[in-house]
Amino acid sequence: MSSEHYSQKYQKKILIRNINSSNKLKLSLDIIYKLLGEKKDSNTRYIKYKKLFYQIPLPTQIDNFLLDYFNFINSKFITKSGTYKKYLAWEKGWKFNLNRIKRNFNIKFLTPKFVRKDQLLRINGKYIIPKSSNFETRLFQTIKLIIFYKYIKNINYIYEFGCGTGHNLIFLSKHFKNLKFIGTDYSRTSQNILNIVNKRFSNINGFFFDITKPSKNFYIKKNSIVFTVGTMEQVGKKYRSFFKFLRKNKPNIIIHFETFNELYSNYTITDYLTKKYLNKRNYLKNYLSFLRDKEKKKIIKITKVQRIFGNQFHEGYSCVIYKFVN
């Protein structure tokens, strides 16, 4: 069996110990706004939020998890991003979703396999045990709405680069019905999924696009938002060409929901292990530093840098937002 198979099997093993804990706690909408560094405004009335509940893991559970985490990092099961093996793993994952919607088109079948249930999550460096169904998906949906409502003024198009199954685009299209949505991905299977999605959602279209080798024939239309979710993490250090492509096309705003190695410190064991994990995965490296350098040169203006939340290994839904000024 492939190392990717063993990697997933090993990660599932880590989840088994996380079961009993303390009483349920509520993650309120006020807390989510605070987590994002945002204030409630007139758009808040559009966000229909159903309360999410979680528990705090016991110290013994954290100890057990950290031991498993350490062993996982030092195992041979971690596959690096940006490799052909990883590409095949993505294709296999998207084919799983493709086959399901071919048999029965249901939006829930578009949820990627990497969104797992009953696992530890990290919110701003702290571990929690989610106790509400689809906790990760529902929390991120709320975060997306808060962010997009803030930046949606005078926008006609929303582009997602690395859209996978298009589940993010479908969610946003239901809230911003007058906009056009474009999903790009370097996976051919992803585009097959988008073709099926387009038959149900005519305002969503898919195109092939490799962000490490941007096509000269692909253009971003005026009055657009560009966003990524866990896409940049897959390119390691190969983000300069995509930045040049964005600068040439100058969308109104760029929103990244990604993991940023600069947001983790060496002062806590969890952050220390996360930095080692990101390095071994060959995930996005020094992109935030790269953007800060561009800001110093007055090429861009960074409007948000926020560590938010993610899975047990890293906070992949952290947010960086910027726009071009030159």
Image (cartoon, rainbow, N blue to C red):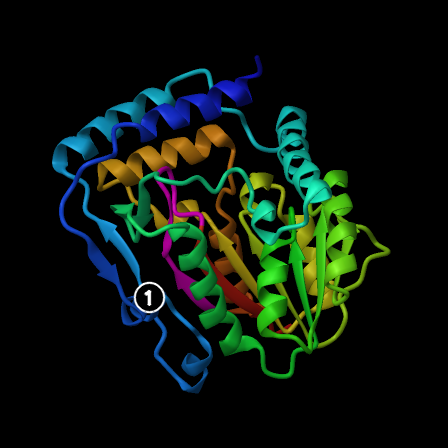
Image quadrant holding the C terminus, namely bottom right
Q: Write down the region rendered in magenta.
A: 303-316
Residue closest to the eye, 273 or 326:
273
Q: What residue sits 64% from the left and 46% below the top? A: 164
Residue under circle 1? 32
Residue 162 visible, this orientation: no
Dot 1 lies on which element?
A: helix
Residue 52 visible, this orientation: yes
Residue 254 is situated, as x and y percent measured from the top left of the image, at 59, 65
Amino acid at circle 1 = Ile
Q: Is residue 309 magenta?
A: yes
Residue 318 is situated, as x and y percent measured from the top left of the image, at 42, 55
Residue furthest to the right in view is 217
Relative vertical location of residue 291 with respect to residue 268 in this rendering, above or below: below
Relative vertical location of residue 181 with respect to residue 215 in this rendering, above or below: below
Q: Is residue 203 magenta?
A: no
